Amino acid sequence: MDNIAHRTYIKIGEFLKKDIAQGKYKIGDRLPTEREISEKFAVSRTIVREAIVMLEVENLVKVKKGSGVYVIQLPEERAKKQPDSNLSDVGPFELLQARQLLESSIAEFAAQLATKNDIAKLKKILAQEQKLLHENADDYSADRDFHLCLAEITQNDVLIKIQHDLWTYRFNSAMWAQLHARILKNDYHHLWIKDHENILLAIQRKDPALAKKMVWQHLENVKIKLFELSDVEDPKFDGYLFNTNPVVVGI
C-alpha cells in the first residue's frame, strides 16, 4: 500500500462524505446503520466502523450510543477549519514526539483539575477499550477518546483543538495506516490498555508528576513497538530522526 487513499475504510469514508456534501444527508440527519452501509458496499462492519471513526475525528459526525450516527458538520465547512495540509502525511515518529511533548504536559495539568465526573468518564472509556479488546474488534475509537478526554479535563480549548488535530494527522498518515495494520496483526492493543490503566491511576491520585511520566512512557512504548514493526527501507521512514528523547522526564 503506497497511499492511505487505497485503504478500504478511507474509500467508504469518502463515499459517505460525498453523500453529505451533495446534500443527501444534512446536518442533524442520521446516517444509515452500520449493517446497511456494510451491505451496500459489500464490506465488513469493522471497515464501516473505521470509516465512521474517520468522519468522527474530522468532526463531521457524532456517534450517539443506542441512537445512531448523526451529521454535525458539512465537509466544506470542515475544509475551512482543517489543519495545515502540508502536515497531511506527517511521519509517525515525528507525530509521536509531538504527542509526547504535548500530552505529557496535558496529563500533568489534568491530574490537578480532574473531578469525580472526569474520573468516571475515563473509567467508562477504559471499560469500553477492554470490551472492544475482548471482542477482538478492530476499533481504536476508545483509545482516541481516552486521550481526548485528558485534554478536555484541562478545559483549555486550544489544547483540546490541538489534540483533535493530532488525531487527524494520525488518520491522514500513510505510514500510520501501514503500521496500524501491523499492530493489529501482532495484537499490541492490550499493552496500550495497561498503560491507560496506569495513567488513570495517576490521575485518580492527583499526582501530576506521575501522570506526566505515565503518558510519556505510554507513548514511548508505542514508539518502540512501531520502530520494531517499521520497514526501515521505506523512503518515508522517519524513525531515525526521532528515536531519541529530547526531554527527560524525571523518575
Image (cartoon, rainbow, N blue to C red):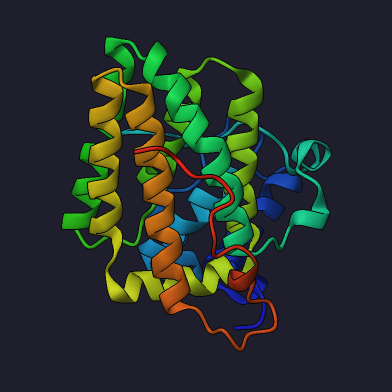
199 or 139, nearer to the observer: 199
For the view shown, which residue lies furthest in the bottom direction?
233
How many numbered markers are drawn? 0
Answer above or below: position of 218 versus 137: above
Answer above or below: position of 206 versus 160: above
135 or 101, nearer to the observer: 101
Q: Measured from the top left, where is residue 116 in percent x and y? A: 27, 11
Answer above or below: position of 108 versus 177: above
Q: Measured from the top left, where is residue 188 in percent x and y? A: 29, 65
Mark yes or no: residue 29 visible. Answer: yes
For the view shown, which residue lies furthest in the left direction?
134
Name the residue at 29% across, 59% down: 189
What is the quadrant of residue 14 in the picture?
bottom right
What is the quadrant of residue 42 in the picture?
bottom left
Name the residue at 68% across, 77% down: 236
Answer above or below: position of 181 versus 102: below
Q: Quadrant of the C terminus?
A: top left
Q: Is residue 146 left or right of residue 58?
A: left
What is the quadrant of residue 233 in the picture?
bottom right
Name the residue at 63% across, 76% down: 237
Name the residue at 37% across, 58% down: 221
Q: Quadrant of the N terminus?
A: bottom right
Q: Measured from the top left, where is residue 84 in percent x and y? A: 81, 47
Q: Measured from the top left, where is residue 6 in percent x and y? A: 63, 76
198 or 60, nearer to the observer: 198
Mark yes or no: residue 62 visible. Answer: no
138 or 211, nearer to the observer: 211
